[in-house]
Image (tube, rainbow, N blue to C red):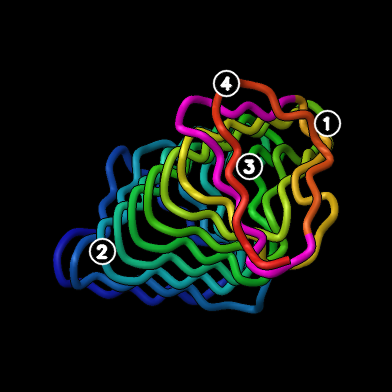
Amino acid sequence: MVGNARANLYGTLWEIVDKNFTVGSGDYIQMTGNGNGDSFILNNGNFYHNDSTMDFWGNAQIGYNWWANFYQNGGQMNVGGYLSIARYGGSGYLEVNGGTVNSYNHQIIVGEVGTGYMAMKGGYAYTYQGVSLSGNSGSSGTLYLNGGTLEAGAIWKGGGSGYLSLNGGTLKATQNSWDFISGLNSANIDGGGAVIDNNGKGIGINQTLTGNGGLYLYGNN
């Protein structure tokens, strides 16, 4: 969808299968339904959100039983249900370069059943609950924080494998958590360093941090 378009999707399941799909300036996508059982699926292609607003009242899934890459370059994406990357046997990639990703009710799951990647290179992402790296047994989730700001309740490993790479950007707490980073297979600080802002919350890191980058802690607590 390119240009000044508007799409209002009503129902329980909507799927976009396309090699290249772009939401640009003046576009608006809204999906409404009955809540968390509703799903908006991005499958088998590259998807570019360059401007304007995308509202999903239910779940948003990047890579379902195929692959999908979602590039958040501008505008705002709001997800009321779960934001899942690599749902079922698929693979998925979410890259945040600008604008806002807002998962305001639930966690972001990177690699729920398949292999998922999330890369913060700029912009802002918010998830009050936090980020689960992997979901079910056999899945894999990797988070790269290279720029921008990720505001999250915690980062933890689910039932599969979870990997964290910190190389710039800011990780900011939304709530008190003594396991703010915990249980991962690896958490590496690269040359760009790791900036962690407790945002006035009480947080702890129950995780071995490796690598040659610096760790910078900010906040009032």
Place of residue 115 in the rendered image (x, y in percent of width and height, measured from the top left):
62, 30
Is residue 139 in view?
no
Q: Which residue is mark 3?
A: 110
Residue at 26% x, 64% y is: 51
The kind of secondary structure element at disc 1 is loop
Q: Is residue 88 magenta?
A: no
Task: Give me the C-alpha separation between circle 1 and circle 3.
Answer: 13 Å
Part of the protein shown in magenta: 186-202
Residue at 60% x, 38% y is: 215
Q: Amino acid at mark 4?
A: Asn
Task: Specify which label sits upstream in the sequence, 2 or 4.
Answer: 2
Task: Give me the C-alpha separation between circle 3 and circle 4.
Answer: 25 Å
The kind of secondary structure element at disc 3 is strand
Residue at 48% x, 37% y is: 93
Task: Give me the C-alpha separation between circle 2 and circle 4.
Answer: 37 Å
Task: Specify which label sits upstream in the sequence, 1 or 3.
Answer: 3
Q: Which residue is mark 1?
A: 137
Task: Give me the C-alpha separation between circle 4 and circle 1.
Answer: 31 Å
Residue farthest left in this picture: 3
Q: Amino acid at mark 2?
A: Asp
Left or right of 111 on screen, residue 159? right
Frontmost of labels 4 and 1 is 4
